[in-house]
Image: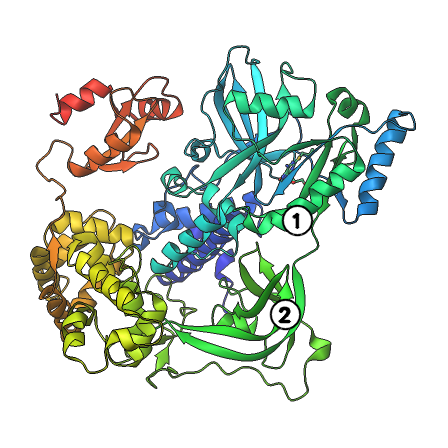
Amino acid sequence: MPADRSKIAIEKLSEAQAKSEYRRLTTELAAHDERYYQKDAPTVSDAEYDALRRRSEAIEKKFPKLVTKDSPSQKVGVQTSGRFAKVLHAVPMLSLGNAFSDEDVTDFVERVRRFLKLGDGDIPAIVAEPKIDGLSLSLRYEDGDLVTAATRGDGFEGEDVTANVRTIADIPHKLKGRAIPAVCEMRGEVYMLKSDFLALNKKQAEAEDTIFANPRNSAAGSLRQKDPSITASRPLKFFAYAWGEMSEMPADTQFGMIQWMAKAGFVTNRLTTLCDSVDAVLTFYRKIEETRGALGYDIDGVVYKVNRLDWQQRLGFVSRSPRWAIAHKFAAEQATTVLNDIEIQVGRTGALTPVAKLAPVTVGGVVVQNATLHNEDYIKGIGSDGQPIRDGVDIRIGDTVVIQRAGDVIPQIVSVVLDKRPKSATPYKFPQICPACGSHAVREADPKTGREDSVRRCTNSLACPAQAMERLKHFVSRLAFDIDGLGDRQVEEFFADGLVMAPADIFTLQKRDARSLKKLSSREGFGATSVRNLFAAIDARRRIALHRFIFGLGIRHVGEGNAKLLARHYGTVEDFRAAMIAAGKGPESEAYRDLNAIEGIGTVVANAIVEFFAEPHSVKAVDDLLAEIEVLPAEKARTDSAVAGKTVVFTGSLTKFTRDEAKALAEKLGAKVAGSVSKKTDYVVAGEDAGSKLAKAKELGVAVLTEDEWLALVGDR
Ligand code: IVH
């Protein structure tokens, strides 16, 4: 048996052994990083992780040739180990006991009354508020300034996420008002709106990046980022509802504290209500339960807290939950149903996505008949990290399954009731050919990890009708051509009837309709007015911004952000088209190198664009479209300014311009604006009260400019 490589001392490794051991460590570290950062569910201790990391670094030191840009050591980290620093909570962050029925709530109030020895008729006033389904955060302010932000962790020790938290607009950097206690630890919940979560997932899907299961995971994943500029780009929000260490108390009731927090600059939940009887509490609960769907954010219950703080003090805690508060949970939104079929949908980039067709069932007041099955491995019971999910149980047609509306949004299958599995049920065979066009569908190997991609794709991007139709839907979508009155349904109809098969057809529709015997206005669902409006909406888009045009092409990996980078770099559609065709000559061509050198455009993206333009069919579709429309030039990123190609960080309160203005100007001049200071930063522009970033800049020897010096540098003065 060969020796276990993981045990061989580095000095004894041959070059070949080192190579394979290094590959093993890199893959393992990447998997640990994903579990830690994306899933918030590490499977090894920090010490074990650090040991792997040290071994990987030792190999790099001895065999520097092995280092690539994807090596663990080349990734940005908060600390050298890539993990967050630990913060000990001055006052532990405890959890709440649960109530599941009205009786549990009555019991809770009774317990409080008995403990406080209240008289028969004395009902303690209770603050009722929604229980936000996010993650709790503790914010420490000293002399009114935010100094540390920490996650809950195990309740006693959390993680330092200060740099990331500073990018959340709802969280003040400085407390407002005069008599601010010297130490204030404000606590509350970081969350994401359901609409923001859906939009983020859409963007992530376009960029083929991590998809989040629900708003809670997406908030956690966004907060726990190594790079604060990524957190900054995620729409995180915060409700304040509790506190930790306070050097003085600004109020003597729970309700008074919430009012004070609002005055100090926090967002507090407007539904928070002071109740004076058990009936009032239960009425509040029912009202919230009925309206929760319309709230915009996920909640998983209602929290009741005794209003008087001196009573809270007396009631104290039992084990790890307060006696003065309880969480009244909503009934779990799960239901059992039968999986009738698995349908395969073909996406714009050829991805085959399985969808569960369920016997209709009501979950939390909504009828569910579809659930996502993600991909082939998911059906088999294997997660994206190769680890078992649902205890490794596969999903078969005919199975009885438990479904859940995850975070209220996307229904998912949480488990299979094996006792009810029909004898005839067989493991699901994922199709190897595209159900829309019959071409081979394959799982490509990820060029980075060498691992098989979890997505199976149709290989016939040209003639696959499903892909062509999805590309059209993408073309008319909001961030692309955004044509009013031409939504998914109309695209499907027009495509099925052969009226619109490619983007250019949209712009010739009116001309063709004028000559046609079967007028659009005679179609079901269309009247003369709606057709007139549709043509007007199409005409309005005959002039289009370059980035929308590029995004609309639906090239793999080219999301809105990359489309903007490309538009700013090439300026006009003519230059863009010519450069992309020239780049097709190969990675040695100047055009390819120029494309790959755009900050933010990596090899994977560059290759996808070049592949698209290498296809005569795509070029024809682009040219046909260009014959019908005018693409407006983008403002080109300048390469001649003093800050072109430089990385700039703005910090502190700026007085000469807003953050957005500063960013827009810098980007226009060809600079890259980052959210955190690192060795790669060229300039830090520091306004008033600049804090940790300024300190970091000084520590790293990065040039620090005042606002005026910055303006002088960019020649705006
Ligand atoms: S009060 C001492 N209020 O629920 C207890 N918690 O199970 C302080 N949560 O970790 C917590 N909304 O993340 C409180 N309005 C609310 C809440 C809330 C959500 C979460 C919080 C905490 C968990 C407790």
* Quarter of the figure that contains the C terminus: top left
- Disc 2 residue type (three-letter): Val
Circle 2 packing at 10 Å, graded few (<14), some (14-19), many (20+), is some
Q: Secondary structure at mark 1?
A: helix
In the depicted structure, whether residue 394 falls above or below residue 632: below
Comparing 366 with 115, the one in front is 366
Regarding residue 379, the answer to whether it shows in the image is yes
> Can you tell which mark lies on residue 46?
none
| Left or right position of 492 against 628 | right
Mark with earlier residue (1, 2)? 1
Q: Secondary structure at mark 2?
A: strand
- Position in image of residue 321 (x %, y %): 75, 36
- Position in image of residue 683 (x %, y %): 24, 28
> Can you tell which mark lies on residue 361?
2
- Residue 638 occupies which quadrant of the picture? top left
Q: Which residue is mark 1?
A: 289
Q: From mark 1 to mark 2, how far is it between C-alphas?
A: 20 Å
In the depicted structure, whether residue 531 falls above or below residue 171: below
In the depicted structure, whether residue 446 falls above or below residue 593: below
Circle 1 packing at 10 Å, graded few (<14), some (14-19), many (20+), is some
Q: Quadrant of ligand 1?
A: top right
Pointer 2 residue Cβ closer than 8 Å to ligand 1: no
- Residue 366 occupies which quadrant of the picture? bottom right
- Seen at 23% across and 64% down, the residue is 532
| Left or right position of 8 against 312 | left
- Disc 1 residue type (three-letter): Glu
